[in-house]
Structures are given as C-alpha cells and as structure tokens.
Amino acid sequence: MQDGHSNEEHSHVTSYGTLVIIWLALLGLTSITVTVAGISLGMYTLFVAMFIAAVKSALVINIFMHIKFEDPIFKVFLLVSALTLLVIFVLTFVDFSFR
C-alpha cells in the first residue's frame, strides 16, 4: 500500500493446469527445434529456429513472467527492447551476408 497500488490490482494467479500445459508446450517446441537443427532445410533452417524461439519466448514472457497482466508501460519497455534486439539481429545478418 506504500507505493499507491493495492494488492487487488496485481492479484492474478495462473492455474497449475495452465502452467503445466505451457511447460509441455515449451518442451515440445524445444524438441521441434532440435529436430529442425538435424534436418537440412537449407537457408530456412535459421528462420524456422528463430520463429520457434520467438514463440517460446512469448510464452515465457506472457505466462511465467506475467507481463500479460502488467501495466501497459511494461509492455512498452518490452517492445522497445525487442525492437532494439531486432535491429541488432538485422545489422548482424547484413554484416554477415556481405563478407
């Protein structure tokens, strides 16, 4: 109560069933990532692995870190950090492709 927020605002509790389902989904996506690494998809292997990693990180951020239920300012900070990471990835891939 000292910071002006009551406990009722942030009292969302995720059920154990949902957490177990998300955990199983993360295990499944990890096994798919390992499988994709063993299959030769040519130039699409990296993009498929990055897409799966993005889905896994979205699940962890939204469910386990409870960003889904936080104030909008946290979502803005998350978006800014994701865009910064995207710029770093794009610059790295551009640098790598012109070597």
Image: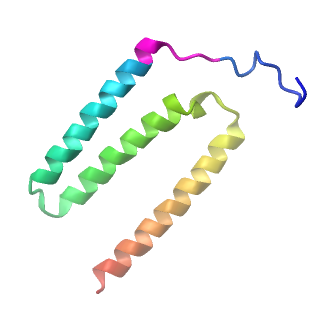
- For the point 21% across and 38% down, the residue is 31
Of residue 44 and residue 27, the one placed in the foreground of this image is 27
- For the point 88% across and 23% down, the residue is 1
Tell me, what colour scheme is on the image?
A: rainbow
Q: Quadrant of the C terminus?
A: bottom left
Q: Position of residue 25 (x, y in %)?
A: 31, 28
Q: Position of residue 64 (x, y in %)?
A: 50, 30
Q: Quadrant of residue 90?
A: bottom left
Count the labels in the image.
0
* 47 falls in the magenta region: no
Side of 62 relative to 26 (left or right) = right
Side of 10 relative to 66 (left or right) = right
Q: Position of residue 16 (x, y in %)?
A: 45, 14
Side of 60 relative to 40 (left or right) = right
Of residue 80 and residue 10, the one placed in the foreground of this image is 10
Side of 3 relative to 95 (left or right) = right
Q: Is residue 45 above or below residue 92?
A: above
- For the point 17% across and 53% down, the residue is 37
Q: Is residue 81 above or below residue 24?
A: below
Give the magenta part as a residue range: 12-18
Q: Residue furthest bottom?
A: 99
Q: Position of residue 88 (x, y in %)?
A: 48, 68
- For the point 28% across and 32% down, the residue is 27
